[in-house]
Image: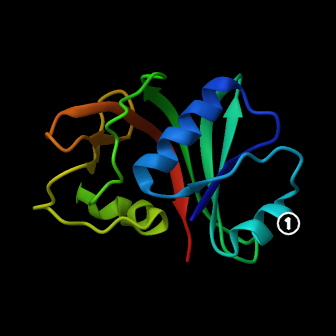
Amino acid sequence: MLLTTSRKPSQRTRSFSQRLSRIMGWRYVNRGKMSIRDVLIEASGPVALVSERHGNPSRITFLGDRGDERGYILFNPSFDIRGSERDSPAAGIRSCPPQLKGICRIMGLEVDPGASGSVWELREGEDYPWVMEFFDATGEPAGFKLLIRDFKAGE
């Protein structure tokens, strides 16, 4: 999958997008003046588009290879901008509640309760309906969370 941003993103959105692409093992492309059509041609496959609100990343829209919207995630980010340089691509996701299987599928994450190494964990939250948190290879929180407000994952 190719990950890019909306046009003229803030530095915080660019940092978030670059780190997410490293964690997910996705290719990141600076959008610049590219239209969505140009992005789809560059990707030659599915695209994840990060949009922002008030300078903060707030939505990831997933597009199919023909530009059709496959779904979205509305979230508040919680991440350390400096981030961990030890982020390695996620091996998968160790927990994903049944009502959230669409998020796992649309992001290309295989659910494996016994997964080790760098993994995601998707669970119900306290202040937000759901929390998607990344854990590093040592099993410690890596300081990267998506506090999910809403999502849609179509077919």
Q: Which residue is label 1 attached to? A: 37
Q: Residues within 10 Å of mark 1 (few under 14, many from 20)?
A: few
Q: Which residue: 86% across, 53% down?
A: 34
Quarter of the C terminus within the rendering: bottom right
Which image quadrant for residue 113?
Answer: bottom left
Q: Position of residue 7 (x, y in %)?
A: 82, 41
Residue 20 in the image: above or below residue 141: below
Q: Amino acid at mark 1?
A: Arg
Q: Is residue 52 above or below residue 41?
A: above
Residue placed most toward the observer, 117 or 48: 117
Q: Quadrant of the N terminus?
A: bottom right
Whole-percent x and y of residue 8? 81, 34
Q: Quadrant of residue 15?
A: top right
What residue is shown at x 10% (from left), y 61% (from top)?
Answer: 114
Disc 1, SS: helix
In this view, which residue lies farthest toward the front? 85
The residue sitting at 49% across, 31% down in the picture is 77
| Residue furthest left in the image | 114
Compared with residue 38, is residue 29 higher up or lower down, i.e. above or below? above
Closer to us: 10 or 94: 10
Residue 32: where, in percent of width, then height? 83, 44
